[in-house]
Image: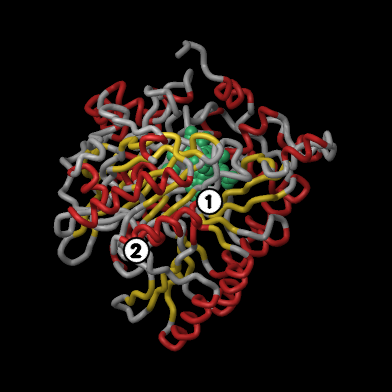
Amino acid sequence: MTDEVSRNERIKEASNYLRGTLAEGLKDTITGAIAEDDQQLVKFHGMYLQDDRDLRPERTRKKMEKAFAFMIRVRIPGGVLTPGQWLALDRIARDYGNGTMKLTTRQTVQLHGIIKSNVTAAMKAIDAVLLNTIAACGDVNRNVMCNPNPYQSRAHAAAIALARAVSDHLLPRTPAYREIWLDGEKIAGGEDEVVEPIYGKTYLPRKFKVVVAVPPSNDVDIFAHDLGFMAIVDDTGAVTGWNVTVGGGMGMTHGEPDTYPRTADVMGFCATADVLAIAEAVVTVQRDWGDRANRKHARLKYTIEDRGLDAFRREVEKRAGVLLKPAAPFKFTSMGDSYGWSHDADGRSHLTLFVQNGRLFPKQIAALRKLAESHDGDFRITPNQHLIVAGIPADKQKEIHWAMNDAGLLAPWSGLKRNSMACVALPTCGLALAESERYLPDLLTALDEKLAAHGLTQDDIVIRMTGCPNGCARPYLAEIGLVGKGPGRYNLYLGAAFDGSRLSKLYAEDLDHTSIIAALDPVFAAYAAGRQKGERFGDFTIRAGFVAATTNGPDFHANVRVKKAEAAA
Ligand code: HEM
Ligand code: SF4
């Protein structure tokens, strides 16, 4: 660690509230890229500059510029879209992007392959349907997630209202977004405090992520996030207040044990009326206490480890003017989605579709477009990269069921597939060390053969893969986690809890396709033969001694007995 602030801090400070030279850079037609500093700033506007890594070798050979294009991530609090908004995103993906849509693990949509000359038009089209992309990436509060479950109507209504209120409250106030992408007009800025009353000139030390959960479903993965609110519900189904969680996070770096994933702590309980004050205080304490010298140590999880939960809680209470009560008892049972049809008390029906790895291909997009054209419920992206078509009238059910079946959007039988997620990785993600989204389906097919041999086909086992240790698909909370190490090679983690409350532990390193299967097959066999009634796979791998239980972040790298590839195979 150094005493100096990191490069990103200087870029933010000099950016004049996220303007940088973005407006000028967009007009430069000589390159498909933008200036280096602007590449950091553009994240706050919901975009990453990327290049197609599949095309890199050929373009280098031909001495051509990389195939640059932008990824645009939409801000969709709670993942709820109207059919009109869905249709607009579909149109933008086809008109300006590569024609696919990625439903993300944080309930948004990512559009890939948008070249520079199309970005402004895409942003205007997003704005036209009352959506935006501000703060979808960057050192700021990102998309606020919320349990999308439409059948627990009362608690869900309270949860989504809370998610939207927190999202609005923590939005950056800079007019730069409108200036650059929409109006083109520079609006005279006020005093610093007025421009960003919560964030100030340099925003947060790192990204910040908020979720709202409704137990018993932990589909939002509350323990993976910086700040969480957990609905506490009385016998009538009414929300009486919220448990507050702080300090969860996934990202780490291979070979750097000072970096680790961490599950959030439950900090206390607050009333609905106090939620915004608490959220703001958590953000401003992290703004002031977070590490601005070392970005790998800058997330709230490290602030809490360094300062202690008690000191953090006291400072939050002081700034919010609210005393937290002791946390209320709660119980989570799973983090997955319930696929298929569900029906609520108001007589409406909802269909949860299965979108493998969240990637919608043209045929599936076409089927959903047809549905959206006549649907008047809403579309809800789940935290597991799937999609709920909510509010379907009885007379439409059959037709919609078969249309979705034909498009390959109904859930498969395989318990492993049903509980799988993969991040994007190659070819767009510049940080990917290995394939993820494009590879996981093949691996699952191979693993399913083994599971079938052990009679485990329909057992729910959570598996998640990422192309690098940043952990965008939250692999350290999966019962089977695979994290890219290099081309075609993965680290294998086991032992996380099915309800998302316990991290996993490294089990084997540097595995290729064959050795992943060889490493897992004996564990599957042991589980089939030796599990206790109702025992989950993750819990079993600990009891049977395959891995030690991880108790929290700093303990993630402890008690590891790693198997090398050869030994595992
Ligand atoms: C140091 C940490 C991280 C960095 C630098 C990072 C960077 C990125 C980048 C560049 C992408 C774009 C990939 C593409 O679309 O081509 C991405 C995707 C994504 N990231 Fe991260 N990420 C980090 C950690 C995380 C964590 C911990 C989470 C969630 C808990 C997360 C959530 C996501 C989501 C939801 C996507 C969209 C794709 C998907 O659903 O797989 N990221 N990230
Ligand atoms: S986990 Fe790594 S490879 Fe996957 S999307 Fe995130 S940053 Fe990219």
- In the displayed structure, 13 sits above or below 363; it is above
The residue to which callout 1 is attached is 439
How far apart in space, not on screen, are marks 1 and 2 (Cα)? 20 Å
Marks 1, 2: nearer the viewer: 2
Q: Is mark 1 within 8 Å of ligand 2?
A: no
Q: Depth check: 315 or 254 in front?
A: 254
Q: Is residue 304 visible?
A: yes
* 78 up-or-down from 545: above or below: below
Query: Residue 42, how many percent across, how many down?
Result: 63, 37
**Label 1's element?**
loop
Residue that numbered label 2 is attached to: 452
The colouring scheme, among rainbow, by chain, secondary structure or one colour, is secondary structure
Q: Amino acid at mark 1?
A: Tyr
Residue 249, quarter of the rendered image: top left
Residue 185, position as x, y percentages in the image: 73, 43
Q: Residue at x 75, y 45 (%)?
A: 116
